[in-house]
Amino acid sequence: MDALVTRDASLPAAYSDALDTLALAPLWTALHTLLPNERTTPAVPHVWRWRDVRPRVLEAARLVPMEQAERRVLVLRNPGLGGAYAITSSLFAGLQVILPGEAAPSHHHTPAALRLIVEGHGAYTTVEGVKCAMEPGDLIITPPMRWHDHGHEGSEPVVWLDGLDIPLVRHFDAAWASKMRPAQPPATATDPSQDELTASGLVPRQSRYPRTGFPQVRWPWTTVRAALERLAATTPAGQAVTLRYVDPTTGAAPMPTMGAEAHWLRPGERTPAARRTSSEIFHVIEGRGRSRVGDSALDWEKGDTFVAPPWHWIAHEAHEAPAALFSFTDEPALRALGLYQEEAASS
């Protein structure tokens, strides 16, 4: 993106100096940088390959003790953002690892967060006392200002993809986190997805779980995958097979600023191209394929993560077998601000 020009070379230098002294600047020199005629973003399409990243994540677990890191995360930095800790201008993503027997301390913070489990078994996240098992493909959310910690009762490293709205919250000067405190024993042995929220269109008259304002905080992959397969069996060829993660009591996105979706790609089929004003980060849960994001062709396989910046045409296709993608976006925030728009490619 172009740098702001804050001085008009056609004006007398003394006048421009006076403006600087008064903390003033001419708008006309920067108007088309602030409001360009085309939608622009410095973020670029990029893929982080699991086969390359995984060894570094596991090495971090060996080199950095939990007591030092508090959260042992390798950040996915978009190459177009100048080294910023961000995957797009509004979203953060990282890969976090926890080892058997470890406990990540408890805290809460203003940014919203979600976790998509990538690898391993035996770990759990506690959200406001609700214990959520972490199995590959599961989605777990930690809404703003909810206490959460992580524990591990298994025998192998567990890795998950973190998604947060940190850049967006920082833009509002609203980023804040509590001091860490020791992880607390869970108040429940399970989460509502295990017994109260197991069927579409049904919710308990009264939940037995703590009232946090967010009735569902975990979506098991086994449930989501089965729903995707059923939908794919009845969806006509050429139409996308996508399910949104929602609050089952309202149908709205699980959190105010971030949404998530699961996508099923049938072999050899190319999804219709579309572009949106939202950022979208994809993680490959199953399969192999290719996505075209703008002018970039990104090949991917299980475990890879890739990013589609705003207003880039996106189309996906799987190779020999079906593929499953998870994605998270800032669409709810854009909708709330009246800034969301989408467009389908003409056939």
Image: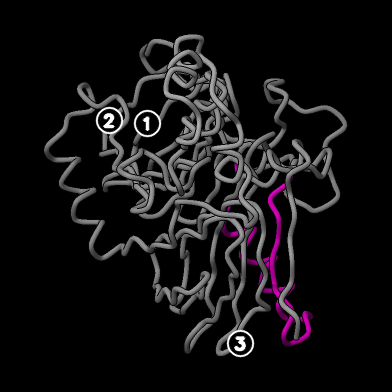
Depth check, front residue: 185 or 58:
58
Query: SS at mark 1?
Result: strand
Residue shown at 58% from the left, 59% from the top: 222
Residue shown at 47% from the left, 37% from the top: 4
Query: SS at mark 3?
Result: loop
Depth check, front residue: 21 or 268:
21
Q: Position of residue 145 (x, y in %)?
A: 57, 19
Sequence-wise, which precedes: disc 2 or disc 3?
Answer: 2
**Tag 3 residue:** 269
Q: Which residues are magenta?
A: 218-246
**Tag 1 residue:** 151
Q: Position of residue 2 (x, y in %)?
A: 45, 47
Above or below for 64 versus 332 = above
Sequence-wise, which precedes: disc 3 or disc 1?
Answer: 1
Above or below for 154 versus 25 = below
Label 3 is placed on what type of residue?
A: Glu
User: Label 1 to label 2, Cα distance in Å?
Assistant: 6 Å
Tag 2–tag 3 contact (CB < 8 Å): no
Label 1 is placed on what type of residue?
A: Gly
**Tag 2 residue:** 102
Tag 1–tag 2 contact (CB < 8 Å): yes
User: Label 3 to label 1, Cα distance in Å?
Assistant: 40 Å
